[in-house]
Amino acid sequence: MLSPTLHFLDGSVDLEQSMKGNYESLLVTLSVVTAVLASYAALQISRIVRRKELSIYSKWRWLAAGALTMGIGIWSMHFIGMLAFSLPVPIQYDPRLTMISVVPGILASAVVMHVLATHEGRLWRINISGFIQAVGIGAMHYTGMAAMIADVEMRYHGGIFAFSLLLAHLLATGSLYVQHRVLDHSHVSKSNQPETLLAALIMGLAISGMHYTGMAAAYYLPYEGTTRLHQDLISLEALVGLILLGTGSILIVTLVVVFTKQNTAKIQDRYRAIFESTGDAIILLDEFGSIQAFNPAAAEIFGFHPNVVIGQDIKLLMPELSTSLQDEFLQHNLADVDGGTMSKRREIEIQRGDGTQFYAELKVRALHEPDGKRFFTSIIRDLTEEHALQIKLLSAQKMESIGQLAAGVAHELNTPAQYVGDNLKFLNESFAEIEILIEKFSQLQNAAESGQITPDLLCEIKERIEYADIDFLRKEIPEALTQSLEGIDRMSQIVRSMKEFSHPGGTEKKPADINRMVESAINISRNEWKYIADIEVDLDKDLPLVPCFVGELNQVLLNLLLNAAQAVAEVYTEGQDHKGKITIRTDYESRHWCLIEVSDSGCGMSEEVRSRVFDPFFTTKEVGKGSGQGLAIAYSVVVEQHAGSIEVDSQVNQGTSFTVRIPIAESSLYDAGLVSA
């Protein structure tokens, strides 16, 4: 287990037994960015503190804000870094030490902010400030490490431990030196962004460099004592909230600093910087669909240089959009956007300049110039990474479903396997008797051919016939074979259904048989409902193949069916005289939509629950019985990935009905007029 005191390696430690940790690269990057952002905010505040027009009270207030920003930034960076780190054992955090760990960083940052606020940039003062900052960073880090509670013993490598503090000292001193030179040799109204960013980057590297060097100094050895994990400790989920609070505080302070420094002359440049630096593609169009502006992100996403597309029609990039934004696209997507309201999200498929295709999110805002002319801002976001994350989330949901269904599927396989085995055993014994009879009849044939049939042989054959009970075998063997074939077919259906359910998610839609997907969901979930509900299936045989993400839609169908079974189980229990009812229906609705309806006679839901049923992590189940992600995933898959709709109709004690509509073709979205993008 971890100890609140530091322990270093000695000759008695076998490092071969130490546990290896892993890092999540995205969280590591986020931790470094957090440290740099906090440093940047604090350094910007130091510029404000130097303003002569500020009162003493205002200076101290800004100093406190800077110290808090930097201290919380160090703290947030540490715990984001800890979230990025994983060991093969559960980890929790001591709440007292976790909260105490933020104090050293804030105190050290207060000293540094005070030094930066002065005009005395002597090297010895900067060096001492860098040392104090390094000590604060180190104290925060190792206090935070001491807050970890896990069933391991942590030892530090003395050399790397010392180097982590030295590295923090050198980088912090370098950052303060750069910032002091900026402040001492420039007017406070000048931005000096490159130098400030350099100083923030160095300070951010001092914070994160010390952290990850300190992590490299730690060795985790197996511990065989009594576990210290208990409910009073902070879990990773709770710690996420604390980190978000810290990171949010940094962002808020940064925004305050930025808006404080803003003036009218900088607004235009700032908007231009946002336009050019945002990761989303932004395209400005006139009312006729002609491209007026094209930011670098758009150039990267679409694969066209701005000089090529400026002045061209929007259909050069998105052929499905008509030449004029006054037509069908405007009617269906921009009915509410006049006055600056953003249109509803629409997911479209776009082709890049090199011919490759990708899915993107499109939103449009209509604005008016002073002369009354209307123009449009189109925001396009590449959904490639989002789809990949959704696939991972869906895989996690599938694993949860498989865990829930494992026992039931095993039972469903075991039942036919049992009577197939029993029948095969019976057939084996029966054919053994028949084999003896065949041998006796062969002896009788040989005796007849040689004219040596004896009464004893005939008597023995008669006894074997009576013992084998030929009439019984003649009746039971065909039945055993039929039952065995039925059992094998049942097992084959279950295995096939599980295989179809585990179909991996993809980035492209494929035509799929929805009716067969429904049957597969019914097969693999049978043990969840067969004792408490009768199932009624009404499948439209005219339903064509539907373009969809097969793996994702399989998960939606299973989630809806499991929810129905759980709702029925709230009212009907196994062994009652009457069962509940689950109805699944498909329909080729209006020749535009694939309709899937899952209804149950279960407990139903209140208006309050119904209004939140698609919210992520919302659940009415007991802890441990579901993550609250099933219906949220269903909504995301149906509405966002397939541009369809999902509706719920429910009354308490009257049952629930979920209705899913998936477009048969992309044109269905607007031709049918049932939903807007």
Image (spheres, rainbow, N blue to C red):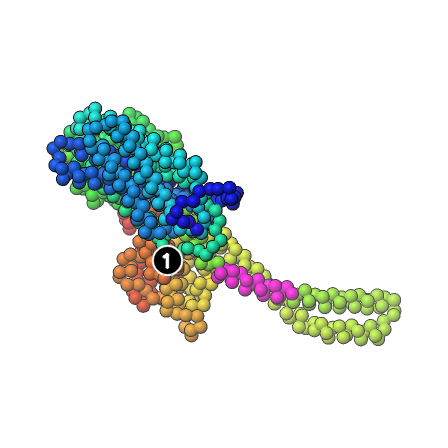
Q: Is residue 110 left or right of residue 552?
A: left
Which residue is located at x 47 percent, y 55 percent? 225
Above-or-below relation of 472 to 8: below
* x and y, in percent, of residue 287 in the image: 20, 35
Q: Which residues are magenta?
A: 407-425
| Number of callouts | 1
Magenta highlight on residue 490: no
**Which residue does the numbered mark 1 point to in the structure image?**
231
Closer to the camera, 241 or 278? 241
Q: Is residue 408 left or right of residue 127?
A: right
Q: Secondary structure at mark 1?
A: loop
Above-or-below relation of 555 to 279: below
Badge 1, how many Cα within 10 Å: few under 14, some, many 20+? few
Q: Magenta-highlighted stretch: main secondary structure?
A: helix
Most distant residue in the top direction: 185
Above-or-below relation of 221 to 568: above
What amino acid type should be assigned to the residue bearing mark 1?
Gln
